[in-house]
Image: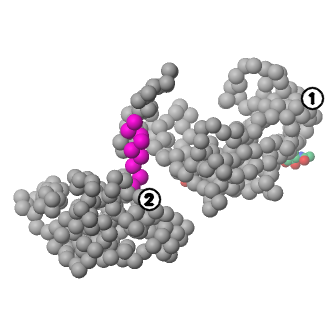
Amino acid sequence: MKFSAFVAVSMALASVSAGPAFVRRASFTLQNGKDAIALNQKFQSLSANSPCQTGEDACVDNKFAQCVNGKFVLQQCAGGLVCAALPLVNSAGTSITCTTPADRDARIAATGATGASNNAAAGNAAPSASSTFIAAPAPSASAVSGGNGGGNDAQSSLTLLQSVIATGFENDGQDQPLAGQVPSLTSSNNFINFCATVPNLPITNGLQIKTGSCNPAPMGVIAATTNMPSSKFQFPKNGGKIPANQNFTIKMAIQHLETGHFTNASNNYFAAPQVVNAQGDIQGHSHVVIDPLPSLDSTTPTDPTAFVFFKGLNDVAQNGVLSVEVGGGLPKGAYRLASINSAANHQPALVAVAQHGSLDDMVYFTVE
Ligand SMILES: *[C@@H]1O[C@H](CO)[C@@H](O)[C@H](O)[C@H]1NC(C)=O
Ligand SMILES: *[C@@H]1O[C@H](CO)[C@@H](O)[C@H](O)[C@H]1NC(C)=O
């Protein structure tokens, strides 16, 4: 087991050094091993309540730990793997990942580093998972560069962490097909390269590309059912009548959305996952849009490009109410006013269950 892991590491080295047929240890290899041992020792003293620096990664109780707002957020490693600091192979530094205890020990041993507690990190028992999982740090120097750390940052590493793989995505859902139900797209790597399947489309890249695009950002934190946002217009009210061509102020009560969070709409559109605050409410903002209608009882679908008023409500709600003035008012006619309650990067709010009341409000009013 150890031997084969060592061979794998040696071959990885050989494949990138393109030089000597027999590989010597690089100048940084021993130090990487020592650093990994020291980190694994340090991790044993950490608990979920240990103070941390935002952005710092670690292992706590064998789980992958990311420091968010000064507190560790733990993610269980999948498939019986344990979290460990490993020596990088191609450059100076270490990486933190999920692996088997045997793979961890073999990689550290392969550096020549020894330490009393090389094997003391938790998970020392014979691994239940086979050790064929190789948590190889990305070989790209840019992904893992930097002393003791470039490769440790989960948000810059090009390696998909074992701890975040959604194995449920491998199932197309058709074990017992419902009439008319279609198979889901499937992936065993979280669809990280999904946009490569639609090479005709540009990557969204934070832009509002009118002809369509493919967005690689994950959806992020999904709000719990106790935190689903909703809103209700206070003015105009449903069925309300307002005078033509005169300023009026839309007022909308909103709950369970921490308003005031909006990113640069030209550059960061759909460009980051949804997040929630400490209470679990989505951090975001809202929008209001007014569509003209042929009549209040029209049954024709509206044209989403043909609205007469649109405004992002970027401010923090005052006493739970967002407002915006419609300068100059509207000409006579029938209208529909709707909210678009959104996360910070403008994506519509995402919540824990499919069956829920509307997260938005819509009212119908006339201008006379
Ligand atoms: C949005 O980002 C772009 C690119 O950095 C910048 O040119 C623009 O001024 C920003 N807009 C706002 C409103 O900050
Ligand atoms: C009407 O609305 C516009 C735009 O919000 C504002 O500049 C203007 O002062 C308003 N006029 C009145 C009479 O309130």
- Percent across and percent down for residue 307 are 73, 32
Residue receiving disc 2? 75
- The residue range painted magenta reads 162-171
Residue receiving disc 1? 368
Identity of the residue drawn at 27% across and 54% down: 129
Please tell me whether residue 165 belongs to the stretch shown in magenta: yes
Q: Residue furthest bottom?
A: 116
Q: Nearer the viewer, residue 313 or 229?
A: 229
Q: Which mark is residue 57?
A: none
Q: Does the image show residue 232?
A: yes
Crowding at mark 2 (Cα within 10 Å: few <14, some 14-19, many 20+): some
- Asked if 61 appears above or below 99 in the picture, the reply is below
Identity of the residue drawn at 36% across and 44% down: 189
Q: Does the image show residue 312?
A: no
- In primary-sequence order, the first of circles 1 and 2 is 2
Identity of the residue drawn at 45% across and 73% down: 47
In the image, taking residue 82 as reference, residue 26 lies left or right, namely left
- Percent across and percent down for residue 167 are 39, 44
Quarter placement of the C terminus: top right
